Image (cartoon, rainbow, N blue to C red):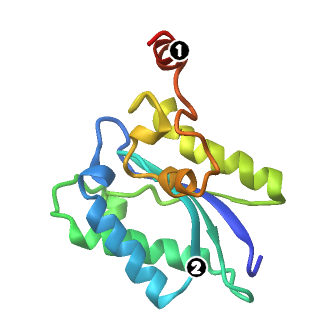
């Protein structure tokens, strides 16, 4: 859908015990910046976890080509990394690295409530996966941008134990 807003989940090929995205977050950011410069889009929200990321993009009017953008981001990021991964025969034949899953999940945001639900999902993800106790503690998230705008309280998505400790101090 041209000009639509999309939610994405993009995974590394080997998710278990893999921290490539946070280990090389600057390379990922550079790949995203370069792609945005060549093919503009707006990142409404993003969270980068060790082995996957979630984001919401708004595409320009008359543009629906998010697959090309993801292809460019993945390829650019992959070129910046040392060749240490194991590559399957099928990936070798296609000239692919073994870094990313070939597919990703996309969802067209339908309305403001759908946007808000996905925004919360994105920002809660580091807590859900046990990387931090509160959303504010995860550095690779647009949560901080929304917090600065007053759209989330500081203790949003705090685990019950963290809230209990804060109430008893």
Quarter of the figure with residue 7: bottom right
Horizontal side of residue 54 vs 4, given as left or right: left
Checking the image for residue 3, the label placed there is none
Few, some or many residues within 10 Å of mark 2 (<14, 14–19, 20+): some
Pick whichever, 5 or 137, lies toward us.
137
Q: Residue at x 49, y 14 (%)?
A: 161
Checking the image for residue 167, the label placed there is 1
Few, some or many residues within 10 Å of mark 1 (<14, 14–19, 20+): few
Query: Residue 39 location, x and y as percent?
Result: 52, 87
Q: Quadrant of the N terminus?
A: bottom right
Give the mark, 2 or 1, whose residue is nearer the N terminus. Answer: 2
Q: Quadrant of the C terminus?
A: top left
Q: How many marks?
A: 2
- Is 4 situated above or below 103? below
Query: Residue 132 location, x and y as percent?
Result: 40, 31
Q: Residue at x 57, y 55 (%)?
A: 146
Horizontal side of residue 121 vs 82, given as left or right: right
C-alpha gap between disc 2 and disc 1: 42 Å
Identify the element where label 2 is drawn: loop
Can the viewer see residue 10 in this picture? Answer: no
Q: Which residue is mark 2?
A: 41
Can the viewer see residue 145 in this picture? Answer: yes
- Is 51 situated above or below 56? above
Q: Are marks 2 and 1 in contact (CB under 8 Å)?
A: no
Q: Residue at x 66, y 78 (%)?
A: 59
Identify the element where label 1 is drawn: helix
């Amino acid at each position: 859908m041209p000009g639509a807003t999309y939610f994405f989940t993009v995974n590394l090929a080997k998710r278990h015990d893999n921290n490539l995205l946070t280990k090389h977050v600057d390379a990922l950011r550079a790949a995203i910046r370069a792609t945005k410069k060549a093919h503009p889009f707006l990142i409404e929200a993003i969270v980068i976890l060790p082995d996957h990321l979630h984001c919401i993009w708004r595409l320009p009017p008359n543009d629906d080509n998010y697959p090309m953008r993801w292809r460019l981001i993945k390829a650019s990021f992959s070129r910046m990394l040392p060749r240490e991964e194991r590559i399957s025969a099928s990936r070798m034949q296609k000239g692919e690295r073994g870094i990313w899953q070939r597919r990703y999940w996309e969802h067209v945001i339908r309305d403001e409530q759908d946007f808000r639900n996905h925004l919360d999902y994105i920002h809660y993800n580091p807590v859900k996966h046990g990387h931090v106790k509160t959303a504010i503690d995860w550095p690779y998230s647009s949560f901080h941008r929304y917090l600065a705008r007053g759209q989330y309280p500081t203790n949003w998505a705090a685990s019950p134990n963290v809230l209990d400790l804060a109430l008893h101090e």
